[in-house]
Protein backbone atom coordinates (compact mmCIF):
# COMPACT_ATOMS: atom_id res chain seq x y z
CA UNK A 1 0.00 0.00 0.00
CA UNK A 2 1.29 3.48 -0.78
CA UNK A 3 2.92 5.39 2.11
CA UNK A 4 1.28 8.56 0.79
CA UNK A 5 -2.06 7.47 2.26
CA UNK A 6 -3.16 9.41 5.33
CA UNK A 7 -4.43 7.92 8.57
CA UNK A 8 -7.07 10.68 8.64
CA UNK A 9 -9.38 11.60 5.76
CA UNK A 10 -8.45 15.00 4.34
CA UNK A 11 -11.68 17.05 4.28
CA UNK A 12 -12.69 18.69 1.01
CA UNK A 13 -14.76 21.80 0.40
CA UNK A 14 -18.06 20.03 -0.39
CA UNK A 15 -20.04 19.75 2.89
CA UNK A 16 -21.05 16.13 2.28
CA UNK A 17 -20.44 12.81 4.03
CA UNK A 18 -20.15 9.81 1.74
CA UNK A 19 -21.30 6.52 3.30
CA UNK A 20 -20.61 3.04 1.92
CA UNK A 21 -21.24 -0.52 3.10
CA UNK A 22 -18.94 -3.35 2.12
CA UNK A 23 -18.11 -7.03 2.06
CA UNK A 24 -14.87 -8.01 0.32
CA UNK A 25 -14.57 -4.89 -1.82
CA UNK A 26 -10.77 -4.61 -1.86
CA UNK A 27 -10.81 -4.65 -5.67
CA UNK A 28 -12.78 -1.37 -5.60
CA UNK A 29 -11.57 0.50 -2.51
CA UNK A 30 -8.48 2.29 -3.86
CA UNK A 31 -10.32 3.53 -6.96
CA UNK A 32 -13.48 4.72 -5.20
CA UNK A 33 -11.55 6.51 -2.44
CA UNK A 34 -9.23 8.22 -4.93
CA UNK A 35 -12.40 9.31 -6.76
CA UNK A 36 -13.73 10.91 -3.55
CA UNK A 37 -10.57 12.82 -2.68
CA UNK A 38 -11.07 16.55 -3.07
CA UNK A 39 -14.86 16.09 -3.03
CA UNK A 40 -16.15 14.62 0.25
CA UNK A 41 -15.73 16.27 3.62
CA UNK A 42 -16.16 12.90 5.38
CA UNK A 43 -16.14 9.26 4.30
CA UNK A 44 -17.62 6.38 6.32
CA UNK A 45 -17.59 2.63 5.74
CA UNK A 46 -19.76 0.00 7.45
CA UNK A 47 -17.99 -3.29 6.76
CA UNK A 48 -19.58 -6.73 7.17
CA UNK A 49 -16.38 -8.49 8.31
CA UNK A 50 -14.54 -8.64 5.00
CA UNK A 51 -11.92 -11.38 4.62
CA UNK A 52 -9.87 -9.44 2.05
CA UNK A 53 -8.01 -6.11 2.39
CA UNK A 54 -11.12 -3.89 2.28
CA UNK A 55 -10.64 -2.51 5.80
CA UNK A 56 -6.85 -2.18 5.44
CA UNK A 57 -7.22 -0.03 2.33
CA UNK A 58 -10.02 2.09 3.79
CA UNK A 59 -8.09 2.78 7.00
CA UNK A 60 -4.95 3.63 5.04
CA UNK A 61 -6.95 6.31 3.21
CA UNK A 62 -8.22 7.75 6.50
CA UNK A 63 -11.81 6.48 6.22
CA UNK A 64 -13.90 6.15 9.39
CA UNK A 65 -14.57 2.38 9.46
CA UNK A 66 -16.90 0.36 11.67
CA UNK A 67 -17.86 -3.30 11.39
CA UNK A 68 -21.26 -4.90 11.94
CA UNK A 69 -22.87 -8.22 11.10
CA UNK A 70 -24.92 -8.03 7.90
CA UNK A 71 -28.62 -8.84 8.40
CA UNK A 72 -30.00 -7.23 5.26
CA UNK A 73 -29.38 -4.18 3.10
CA UNK A 74 -32.15 -2.07 4.59
CA UNK A 75 -31.09 -2.94 8.13
CA UNK A 76 -27.42 -2.15 7.43
CA UNK A 77 -28.18 1.19 5.83
CA UNK A 78 -30.55 2.22 8.61
CA UNK A 79 -27.82 1.41 11.12
CA UNK A 80 -25.43 3.62 9.16
CA UNK A 81 -27.88 6.54 9.07
CA UNK A 82 -28.68 6.14 12.75
CA UNK A 83 -25.31 5.44 14.35
CA UNK A 84 -22.47 6.91 12.30
CA UNK A 85 -21.04 10.18 13.72
CA UNK A 86 -21.78 12.21 10.59
CA UNK A 87 -21.20 15.95 11.06
CA UNK A 88 -21.51 17.16 7.45
CA UNK A 89 -24.91 18.74 6.64
CA UNK A 90 -25.39 16.49 3.59
CA UNK A 91 -25.07 12.71 3.20
CA UNK A 92 -24.52 10.62 0.07
CA UNK A 93 -25.04 6.88 -0.37
CA UNK A 94 -22.38 5.33 -2.54
CA UNK A 95 -21.51 1.76 -3.49
CA UNK A 96 -17.80 0.81 -3.72
CA UNK A 97 -18.21 -0.03 -7.43
CA UNK A 98 -19.46 3.46 -8.29
CA UNK A 99 -17.51 6.55 -9.42
CA UNK A 100 -18.60 10.19 -9.60
CA UNK A 101 -17.90 12.09 -12.79
CA UNK A 102 -16.47 15.61 -12.47
CA UNK A 103 -19.76 16.96 -13.84
CA UNK A 104 -21.72 15.14 -11.13
CA UNK A 105 -19.44 16.48 -8.40
CA UNK A 106 -19.98 20.00 -9.71
CA UNK A 107 -23.73 19.41 -10.04
CA UNK A 108 -24.04 18.24 -6.43
CA UNK A 109 -22.05 21.23 -5.14
CA UNK A 110 -24.18 23.62 -7.19
CA UNK A 111 -27.41 22.04 -5.92
CA UNK A 112 -26.22 22.28 -2.32
CA UNK A 113 -25.37 25.95 -2.78
CA UNK A 114 -28.83 26.62 -4.26
CA UNK A 115 -30.50 25.44 -1.02
CA UNK A 116 -33.66 24.62 -2.97
CA UNK A 117 -34.15 20.93 -2.18
CA UNK A 118 -33.78 18.34 0.57
CA UNK A 119 -32.58 15.49 -1.64
CA UNK A 120 -30.92 14.97 -5.02
CA UNK A 121 -31.55 12.34 -7.70
CA UNK A 122 -28.58 11.30 -9.82
CA UNK A 123 -28.32 9.46 -13.13
CA UNK A 124 -26.37 6.22 -12.75
CA UNK A 125 -24.83 4.78 -15.92
CA UNK A 126 -24.10 1.05 -16.06
CA UNK A 127 -20.71 -0.32 -17.09
CA UNK A 128 -20.51 -4.05 -17.81
CA UNK A 129 -17.60 -6.23 -18.98
CA UNK A 130 -15.55 -3.05 -19.19
CA UNK A 131 -18.01 -1.37 -21.57
CA UNK A 132 -20.29 1.63 -21.08
CA UNK A 133 -23.89 0.54 -21.65
CA UNK A 134 -26.72 2.83 -22.82
CA UNK A 135 -28.58 1.96 -19.61
CA UNK A 136 -29.31 4.54 -16.92
CA UNK A 137 -31.22 4.58 -13.64
CA UNK A 138 -32.48 7.63 -11.77
CA UNK A 139 -31.65 7.17 -8.09
CA UNK A 140 -32.06 9.24 -4.94
CA UNK A 141 -28.55 9.34 -3.49
CA UNK A 142 -28.03 12.63 -1.59
CA UNK A 143 -30.05 14.14 1.25
CA UNK A 144 -29.86 16.46 4.22
CA UNK A 145 -28.18 14.58 7.05
CA UNK A 146 -30.71 13.04 9.41
CA UNK A 147 -33.65 13.26 6.99
CA UNK A 148 -33.39 9.78 5.44
CA UNK A 149 -34.35 6.24 6.37
CA UNK A 150 -34.27 3.12 4.22
CA UNK A 151 -36.95 0.58 3.47
CA UNK A 152 -36.31 -2.32 5.84
CA UNK A 153 -35.90 -5.06 3.25
CA UNK A 154 -33.43 -7.89 2.77
CA UNK A 155 -32.30 -6.72 -0.68
CA UNK A 156 -32.94 -3.80 -3.09
CA UNK A 157 -33.41 -1.22 -0.34
CA UNK A 158 -34.54 2.33 -1.17
CA UNK A 159 -33.96 5.63 0.66
CA UNK A 160 -37.00 7.57 1.84
CA UNK A 161 -36.52 11.32 2.25
CA UNK A 162 -39.02 13.90 3.41
CA UNK A 163 -39.12 17.19 1.55
CA UNK A 164 -38.44 18.31 -2.01
CA UNK A 165 -36.05 16.38 -4.26
CA UNK A 166 -34.49 17.49 -7.53
CA UNK A 167 -32.26 16.08 -10.28
CA UNK A 168 -28.62 17.06 -10.54
CA UNK A 169 -26.52 17.04 -13.70
CA UNK A 170 -23.67 14.63 -14.25
CA UNK A 171 -23.23 10.88 -14.27
CA UNK A 172 -22.63 8.29 -11.58
CA UNK A 173 -20.72 5.41 -13.14
CA UNK A 174 -21.65 1.92 -11.95
CA UNK A 175 -18.82 -0.51 -12.74
CA UNK A 176 -20.80 -3.67 -12.09
CA UNK A 177 -18.23 -6.28 -10.94
CA UNK A 178 -14.63 -6.73 -12.12
CA UNK A 179 -15.49 -9.90 -14.06
CA UNK A 180 -18.34 -12.31 -14.73
CA UNK A 181 -17.22 -14.75 -12.04
CA UNK A 182 -17.73 -12.03 -9.42
CA UNK A 183 -20.96 -10.83 -11.04
CA UNK A 184 -22.50 -14.33 -11.08
CA UNK A 185 -21.51 -14.93 -7.47
CA UNK A 186 -23.20 -11.67 -6.47
CA UNK A 187 -26.36 -12.46 -8.43
CA UNK A 188 -26.48 -15.89 -6.84
CA UNK A 189 -26.63 -14.26 -3.39
CA UNK A 190 -29.15 -11.64 -4.49
CA UNK A 191 -31.55 -14.12 -6.08
CA UNK A 192 -31.46 -16.28 -2.95
CA UNK A 193 -32.46 -13.24 -0.89
CA UNK A 194 -35.21 -12.39 -3.38
CA UNK A 195 -36.58 -15.95 -3.26
CA UNK A 196 -36.66 -15.92 0.54
CA UNK A 197 -38.41 -12.54 0.53
CA UNK A 198 -41.02 -13.78 -1.96
CA UNK A 199 -41.64 -17.01 -0.02
CA UNK A 200 -41.97 -15.34 3.38
CA UNK A 201 -44.06 -12.45 2.08
CA UNK A 202 -41.37 -9.99 3.13
CA UNK A 203 -41.65 -6.30 2.46
CA UNK A 204 -40.75 -4.87 -0.93
CA UNK A 205 -38.95 -1.61 -1.50
CA UNK A 206 -42.28 0.24 -1.85
CA UNK A 207 -46.01 -0.47 -1.90
CA UNK A 208 -46.76 -2.19 -5.25
CA UNK A 209 -49.01 -0.09 -7.49
CA UNK A 210 -49.37 -0.39 -11.27
CA UNK A 211 -50.46 3.25 -11.58
CA UNK A 212 -48.13 4.61 -8.91
CA UNK A 213 -44.59 5.98 -9.02
CA UNK A 214 -41.92 4.29 -11.18
CA UNK A 215 -40.67 2.53 -8.05
CA UNK A 216 -44.17 1.34 -7.15
CA UNK A 217 -44.66 0.06 -10.70
CA UNK A 218 -41.40 -1.93 -10.47
CA UNK A 219 -42.58 -3.42 -7.19
CA UNK A 220 -45.94 -4.34 -8.77
CA UNK A 221 -44.13 -6.11 -11.61
CA UNK A 222 -41.92 -7.94 -9.12
CA UNK A 223 -44.93 -9.01 -7.03
CA UNK A 224 -46.80 -10.32 -10.09
CA UNK A 225 -43.93 -11.35 -12.35
CA UNK A 226 -44.49 -15.10 -12.17
CA UNK A 227 -48.09 -14.70 -13.32
CA UNK A 228 -47.08 -13.20 -16.68
CA UNK A 229 -47.08 -15.39 -19.80
CA UNK A 230 -43.96 -15.13 -21.97
CA UNK A 231 -42.32 -13.31 -19.07
CA UNK A 232 -38.73 -14.13 -20.03
CA UNK A 233 -39.22 -12.96 -23.59
CA UNK A 234 -40.67 -9.76 -22.15
CA UNK A 235 -37.70 -9.30 -19.82
CA UNK A 236 -35.19 -9.76 -22.65
CA UNK A 237 -37.10 -7.42 -24.97
CA UNK A 238 -37.30 -4.77 -22.24
CA UNK A 239 -33.58 -4.82 -21.48
CA UNK A 240 -32.29 -5.35 -25.02
CA UNK A 241 -34.71 -3.15 -27.00
CA UNK A 242 -36.49 -0.72 -24.68
CA UNK A 243 -33.44 0.11 -22.52
CA UNK A 244 -31.27 0.09 -25.64
CA UNK A 245 -28.68 -2.53 -24.67
CA UNK A 246 -28.52 -3.50 -28.37
CA UNK A 247 -26.49 -0.35 -28.99
CA UNK A 248 -23.61 -1.89 -26.99
CA UNK A 249 -23.27 -4.80 -29.42
CA UNK A 250 -22.18 -8.16 -28.06
CA UNK A 251 -21.77 -6.91 -24.48
CA UNK A 252 -25.28 -5.46 -24.51
CA UNK A 253 -26.68 -8.76 -25.76
CA UNK A 254 -24.86 -10.72 -23.03
CA UNK A 255 -26.09 -8.31 -20.36
CA UNK A 256 -29.73 -8.57 -21.52
CA UNK A 257 -29.56 -12.38 -21.59
CA UNK A 258 -28.00 -12.51 -18.13
CA UNK A 259 -30.74 -10.26 -16.75
CA UNK A 260 -33.21 -12.95 -17.87
CA UNK A 261 -31.09 -15.58 -16.12
CA UNK A 262 -31.27 -13.59 -12.89
CA UNK A 263 -35.07 -13.69 -13.00
CA UNK A 264 -34.96 -17.42 -13.79
CA UNK A 265 -32.72 -18.11 -10.80
CA UNK A 266 -35.08 -16.16 -8.58
CA UNK A 267 -38.08 -18.17 -9.80
CA UNK A 268 -36.29 -21.55 -9.64
CA UNK A 269 -35.06 -20.92 -6.10
CA UNK A 270 -38.55 -19.91 -4.99
CA UNK A 271 -40.02 -23.06 -6.58
CA UNK A 272 -37.37 -25.15 -4.81
CA UNK A 273 -38.33 -23.67 -1.43
CA UNK A 274 -41.99 -24.38 -2.13
CA UNK A 275 -41.30 -27.95 -3.28
CA UNK A 276 -38.90 -28.97 -0.52
CA UNK A 277 -40.23 -26.87 2.34
CA UNK A 278 -36.63 -25.88 3.16
CA UNK A 279 -34.91 -22.52 3.13
CA UNK A 280 -31.49 -22.20 1.44
CA UNK A 281 -28.59 -22.95 3.79
CA UNK A 282 -25.40 -20.89 3.77
CA UNK A 283 -22.37 -23.12 3.38
CA UNK A 284 -18.66 -22.37 3.77
CA UNK A 285 -17.07 -20.99 0.63
CA UNK A 286 -13.50 -22.09 -0.01
CA UNK A 287 -10.92 -23.82 2.18
CA UNK A 288 -10.73 -23.31 5.92
CA UNK A 289 -7.91 -23.65 8.47
CA UNK A 290 -5.95 -26.87 8.95
CA UNK A 291 -7.48 -29.32 11.44
CA UNK A 292 -4.56 -30.30 13.67
CA UNK A 293 -6.29 -33.52 14.78
CA UNK A 294 -5.28 -35.08 11.48
CA UNK A 295 -1.93 -35.44 9.68
CA UNK A 296 -1.07 -32.54 7.39
CA UNK A 297 0.66 -32.71 4.00
CA UNK A 298 2.04 -29.70 2.20
Image (tube, helix red, strand yellow):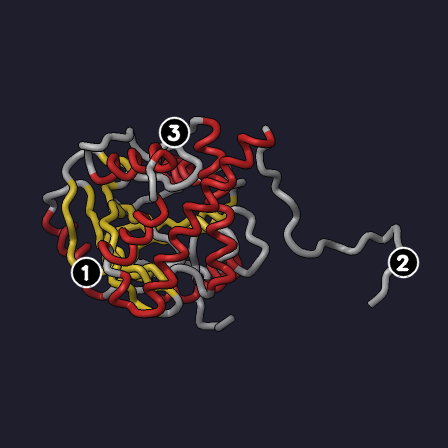
| Residue 147 in view of the camera | no
Between residue 99 and residue 234, name the one nearer to us.
Answer: 234
Judged left or right of residue 111, residue 290 is right
Look at the numbered disc 2 and give the secondary structure of its residue: loop
Judged left or right of residue 85, residue 55 is right
Residue at the spot of label 2: 295
Task: Say which residue appears at 55% left-offset and 36% top-offset.
Answer: 272
Q: Mark 2 or 3 closer to N-term? A: 3
Q: Is residue 232 above or below residue 106?
A: above
Judged from this view, the residue extending furthest toward the front is 229
Task: Say which residue appears at 50% left-offset and 59% top-offset.
Answer: 182
Between residue 122 and residue 130, name the one nearer to us.
Answer: 130
**Residue 137, x across and y down, in percent:** 25, 52
Task: Say which residue appears at 72% left-offset and 54% top-offset.
Answer: 288
Disc 3 residue crowd, few under 14, some 14–19, many 20+, Cα 10 Å: some
Look at the numbered disc 3 and give the secondary structure of its residue: loop
Q: CA distance from mark 2 to mark 3?
A: 50 Å
Judged from this view, the residue extending furthest toward the top is 201
Between residue 297 and residue 68, name the one nearer to us.
Answer: 297
Residue at the spot of label 3: 203
Q: Mark 1 or 2 closer to N-term? A: 1
Residue at the spot of label 1: 170
Between residue 220 and residue 146, name the one nearer to us.
Answer: 220
Amino acid sequence: MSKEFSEVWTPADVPIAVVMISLNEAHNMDAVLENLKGFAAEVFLVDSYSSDETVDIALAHGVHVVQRKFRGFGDQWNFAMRELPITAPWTMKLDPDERLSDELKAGILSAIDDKGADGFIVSRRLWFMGRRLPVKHELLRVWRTGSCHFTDVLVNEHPVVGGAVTHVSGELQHHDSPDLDHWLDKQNRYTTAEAITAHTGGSLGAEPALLGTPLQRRMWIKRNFMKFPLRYSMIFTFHYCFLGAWRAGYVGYVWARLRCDVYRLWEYKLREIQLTGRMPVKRPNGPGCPDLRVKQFG
